[in-house]
Image: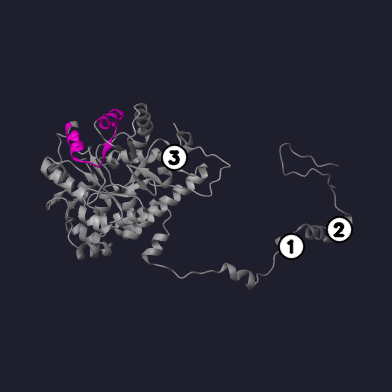
Amino acid sequence: MRQTVPPGNPEAPTTPRATAPDAGASLTGQGTAAAAARGVPDALKRRVPKYADLAPLMQFKKPEFSRAARLRRASTIWDLRDMAKRRTPQAPFDYTDGAAEAEISLRRARQAFLDIEFRPGILRDVSSIDLSTHILGGPSRLPVGIAPTGFTRMMQSEGEYAGCRAAEAAGIPYTLSTMGTASLEDVAAAAPAGRNWFQLYLWTDRDRSLELIQRAAAAGNDTLMVTVDTAVAGARLRDVRNGMTIPPALTLKTVLDASYRPAWWFNFLTHEPLTFASLSRYTGTVADLINSMFDPTLTYADLDWLRETWTGKLVVKGIQTVEDARKVVDHGADGIVLSNHGGRQLDRAPIPFHLLPEVSAALKADHSDSAIILDTGIMSGADIIAALALGADFTLIGRAYLYGLMAGGRAGVDRALQILEKDMQRTMALLGVTRIKDLTPDHVRILTK
């Protein structure tokens, strides 16, 4: 009699099998046991473990609690963010981590990078990956630079010094903010071999703006980045709720918060007091400072004045429409930064990553060679590669490096850049691409819901 096999069962036996065992064997059970023994491989037979087998598995390591060991355990920028949150008081952490109003712009910007599909090529030699590029007339070892961030020594006492030195070591540009807590001259001295850029907010007092421009040139900055999306301050509600002031105020809430982060407060209180290196001493909220300083009457005529005044590369940061991208290029910009200020100004603003293909196509149609730089929402090297594939020439990171700074100072910034570089190398190799210039829109598809 043959066994009936249900259709579609690939693991069912296909050879005939007797339906009844030998009568003698069934009485004693020995025939079944012997057959079972013959059918079990040696590797599946149970035995008493031998020490020689267990010894290679018992590799107990001494616990490591140093900063270096902690940073080595970080595999993603999100890991660094978790560390930063544990080590930084709420007000400065929220100033970095937060955005305007309901923080919709920031969430959408990050989600945009998740809503893509990579299209890899196979059977390519990817044994050597070259991430180097040229941007604004100079080299960069990686297709990413450090964006301008204000009040950086408030996040961690090494502040801009950690950022510019890490950028110098990585061979990438570093951008100092007008709202920085280290001066143009200090950054130039701290990273003399680095490629340093300066970000400018145009003030109502043009003479003070001109003084900063002249200092930037004298300090060796080859690129001036003017930010144009801060006519007034965005409603950064985390800062309002935290009572965020410059410098941080010692209230009952901050004292209680300090009890959980003693290292931050020790560093804060034992280093030079926080000041704006490019401004006069100021005490008050961040929003009040922005509203009192920045010029809401800024127009394209002011951009023309800047173009005539600054002889180096000029970049306009805060572009959020195709029309504005074209117009600032017509007014002499060497590059644009597609950015909604990290979601910190206008909530529900355009998503830079979604805007990128349209802007790239428009500038190509105009035969423009102006550089397209993108920021906002970048949290991995894969995000950077996706932006480059869709038309960006370069990218900038703000929060991604600040999380590293808060997690571990200069070493934390180094770790953030290492994570991003490794991400980029792996993504490029899996896409079957070895050079930045070989990335194309065919490598990325934006998913639609």
Residue in the image at 16% along x and 50% along y? 278
For discs 3 and 1, the disc positioned in front in the rendered view: 3
Q: CA distance from mark 2 to mark 3?
A: 74 Å
- Check disc 3: other Cα within 10 Å, few if <14, some if 14-19, many if 20+: some
User: Circle 1 is placed at which residue position?
Assistant: 42
Q: Which residues are magenta?
A: 301-330
Mark 3: secondary structure: helix
Q: Which disc number belongs to residue 437? A: 3
- Residue sitting nearer the eye, 74 or 11: 74
Numbered label attached to residue 25: 2
Residue 240: percent from left, percent from top? 20, 46
In three-dimensional space, the C-alpha distance between marks 3 and 1, rounded to whole angstroms, equals 55 Å
Q: Quadrant of the N terminus?
A: top right
Real-space CA distance between mark 1 and mark 2, rounded to the nearest whole angstrom: 24 Å
Q: Looking at the image, is 57 positioned above or below residue 383?
A: below
Magenta segment, prevailing SS (helix, strand or loop): helix
* Amino acid under disc 1: Asp
